[in-house]
Amino acid sequence: MKFPRFHLGTGLVILLSYINSYTIVDNQNIIIRVATPEDKIYADTITNEMESSAMARGTGIAKRSPEYISRKIDEGKAVIATTPDGTWVGFCYIETWEGEYVANSGLIVSPEFRKSGVAKAIKQKIFKLSRERYPDAKIFGLTTGLAVMKINSDLGYEPVTYSELTQDEEFWAGCKSCVNYDILMSKERKNCLCTAMLYDPKDHYEPAETKEHFEKKSKVYERLLKIKQIKFLSRFKKIDRTGNRKFKTVFFNLFHL
């Protein structure tokens, strides 16, 4: 395990605090911790994996540059996973809007470490960091994956409509690089392929309750996610004679039955 160098006089308290910021994934040589400036060497790898992963899924994410990732690391708003020898494993960062909303964004895990529980451990770590830094903020996320929905449910998130998310233009501008941006705008930012989930510290169910609810409804959510993909990407996209896209209107919210 590699620790950063501390200046003389920094004190044992700071060192212990740094050590306690580590999470060791069960029975694996994977360390999950708050990222430090030394971790900016992984910025290119992280952004490249984000892009290739989105292309493989056939869905889009807000594209981020290595400079943006580096800035999040400098601000202490990122969590990284590595092996003891320095191999990059995973990453996630915090974004804030209006002083009221926080998102744990850009969750990505290296292909060789997927399906090992790393993603869940990273989400738990970034969620804890968000609650420590912004105890009164609403924490939300947008996802196209059932696995991420399950992780969020285990933390206490609930599925919500897009109207309950931040309306900050800067947040929605981040979706412009997503391949599904036309769909989002055609729905007047009320719906898209992503599912919105929210944790409100002032009004929320306990994690055990949201976890139980998700387990009961998981098949329903899985089916609705597939419906979204099929209908939004095919039936709802119509090409007129001029080559312009037209979209039918969806008169129901897929996740409020």
Image (tube, rainbow, N blue to C red):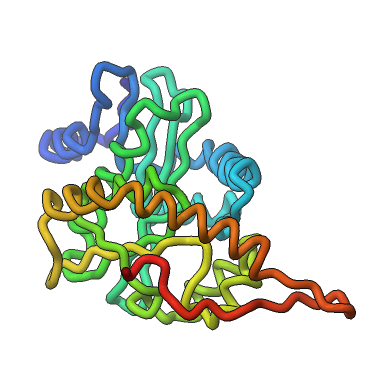
Q: Is residue 137 left or right of residue 241?
A: left
> Relative to 248, does residue 62 appear above or below in the rendering?
above
> Relative to 73, does residue 5 appear above or below in the rendering?
above
Q: Quadrant of the N terminus?
A: top left
Residue drawn at 74 percent across, 72 percent down: 238
Q: Is residue 191 left or right of residue 121?
A: right
Q: Is residue 168 left or right of residue 61?
A: left
Q: Quadrant of the C terminus?
A: bottom left
Find residue 221 and report its image quarter: bottom left
Q: Nearer the viewer, residue 201 or 238?
A: 238
Q: Give x and y (percent) for residue 11.
A: 14, 37
Q: Nearer the viewer, residue 37 or 192?
A: 192
Residue drawn at 59 percent across, 57 percent down: 230
Q: Give x and y (percent) for residue 175.
A: 56, 67
Outermost residue to the right: 242
Q: Is residue 172 left or right of residue 30?
A: right
